Amino acid sequence: MQFDRIRRREFITLASGAAIAWPLATRAQQSAMPVIGFLHSQSPDAFREQLRGFRQGLKEAGYIEGENVAIEYRFADNQMDQLSELAANLVRRRVDVIATAGGPASAFAAKSATATIPIVFATGDDPVRLGLVASLARPGGNLTGVSFLVTLLSAKRLEFLRALAPGVVRVAALVNPAEAANTEITLRDLEAAARTLGLRGQVLKADTDDEINAAFENIVRERPDALFVAATAFFVARRVQLTQLAAFHRLPAAYPIRDFVDVGGLMSYGVSAADAYHQVGIYTGRILKGAKPGDLPVVQSSKFELVINAQTARMLGLTVPQTLLVAADEVIK
């Protein structure tokens, strides 16, 4: 408070030229710490490991939250109609760069909100096909990011599930209808893989908690042998609900990323989400240092991991074959 009084007295008595310098000095002080806008379609709980990777990437680029960079977080909690306003809020906040997560909807909301603020996205789909960027090598415009193509790993994940639960004949695929492009690719690849493996399938759709519960009521009636959970940010946010329901119904299930296995899911095969968001953090830091997003090639994440929960396997009466024990990146005892 004493400092403030001194400053006000000095401001009043200084000459007009010095008075003009005061607001300029204030702006310089404010701009000393850049601000990142972070836009996510889900909740913080769905992003704990990924956020750790993001911060690590920022650190490697020379930025530590609270020390030389600030982060404004905006989470939509699966209220997709809120993303546009959250993105607009970050634009009004005049952040220096926007990092998006939780599916392409976040990236599109940011893209619609600004054509000038740099945007770094992470998406499990092809960003060129989606229309986010012009090309992977030269994105152009104000967007770049990471593509981890989780939708293209569906066939291999189904193969691992069959190896872990060889008695499986009928598989229920749980997809999110709100992500139409993701669902279309997932089901196309699953259908082809199921034919190769001699499996039959059914499709269950859910994009709310109630619809997840309804899907499992359908499972009780139809009694499939296993569950395949599609890659979508909404399901990651509901991973505890999904893994507990699968365990209650003693249903072998395959998930897209290890977050599910860490809370009791049977197995996952997919991209290392922490690694993907680590790259988002690196790109965000490079842009803060002056790189243009249109000149940064979209990174295609190539670090995939198979994670198996041996305790859940035992609970389901399954024996993890030696081939999977050798192939797994991690086996949770």
Image (cartoon, grey):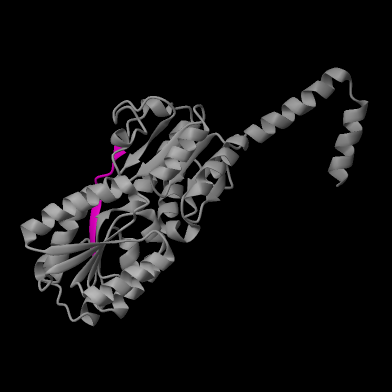
Q: Is residue 60 visible?
A: no
Q: Quadrant of the C terminus?
A: bottom left
Which residue lies at the image location 41% right of the left edge and 37% below the top edge? 283
Which residue lies at the image location 88% right of the left edge and 35% below the top edge? 8
Q: Residue furthest top?
A: 17
**What range of the chain is rendered magenta?**
299-307
Q: Quadrant of residue 322?
A: bottom left
Q: Residue 89 vs residue 145: left or right?
A: right
Q: Is residue 304 magenta?
A: yes
Q: Is residue 264 magenta?
A: no
Q: Taking 213 as reference, is 128 above or below it?
A: above
Camera-side residue: 177 or 56?
A: 177
Camera-side residue: 235 or 27?
A: 235
x, y percent for residue 286: 44, 33
Q: Taking 55 as reference, is 292 above or below it?
A: above
Please tell me whether the stretch drawn in magenta is mainly helix, strand or loop. Answer: strand
Q: Taking 243 as reference, is 108 above or below it?
A: above
x, y percent for residue 208: 42, 62
